[in-house]
Image (spheres, rainbow, N blue to C red):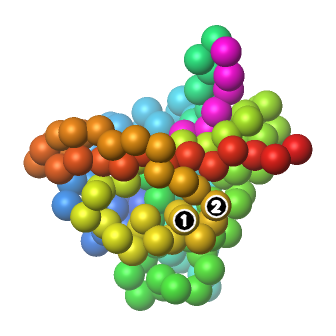
Amino acid sequence: MALADITAVQGIERSSFPDPWARETLEEAITTFSDTVFIAESEGSICGYIICGVEDTGEERYGHICSLAVSPDMRNRGIGKTLVKRAEQAAMIQKATAMQLEVRVSNISAIQFYTKLGYEPVFQICGYYADTEDAIVMMRWFRF
């Protein structure tokens, strides 16, 4: 993903989330996590993206999926799975031992999607989102 991709990514954000990221937040993510942000293209148009970072707790390094979305008309074609796998590879290259993400408790399809990819719920955060909805934190530990 590059700064030139932000307008297309914002369009996907708006069609996917009730609280899309601001342009400035996307710019910061691209700059900060340049090795772990990716887009998917179909016929020359951006149809999906993933924003991921690698965090070091001092005891462990893990990847963190901050945002993932696929255009509504391109869903259920394996694009999201491909983006997650690519982000996991990038995190492993940076010596991450696991990947973490937060998902709305009401987003059953996302929870099922991540579960199929090997992610497990580990705990819930009350009032995580701006509208005070809770989040489920899910993790996938990499097996080496």
Location of mark 1 (residue): 115
Residue 49 shows which numbered tag?
A: none
Location of mark 2 (residue): 118
Whether 63 is among the magenta residues is yes
Q: Position of residue 110 (x, y in %)?
A: 42, 67
Distance from disc 2 to disc 1, alpha carbons, whole Å, reads 5 Å
Choose between 50 and 61: the one closer to the eye.
61
Q: Which residue lies at the image location 81% right of the left edge and 38% below the top edge? A: 93
**Range covered by the magenta-colored residues:** 59-65
Whether 107 is among the magenta residues is no
Q: Which residue lies at the image location 13% right of the left edge and 44% below the top edge? A: 132
Specify the principal SS of the magenta part.
strand
| Image quadrant in which you'd find residue 38 | bottom right
Q: Which residue lies at the image location 67% right of the left edge and 15% below the top edge? A: 59
Q: Which residue lies at the image location 42% right of the left edge and 60% below the top edge? A: 9
Tell me the kind of residue under disc 2. Gly
Q: Is residue 105 left or right of residue 85?
A: left
Tell me the kind of residue under disc 1. Thr
Q: Secondary structure at mark 1?
A: helix
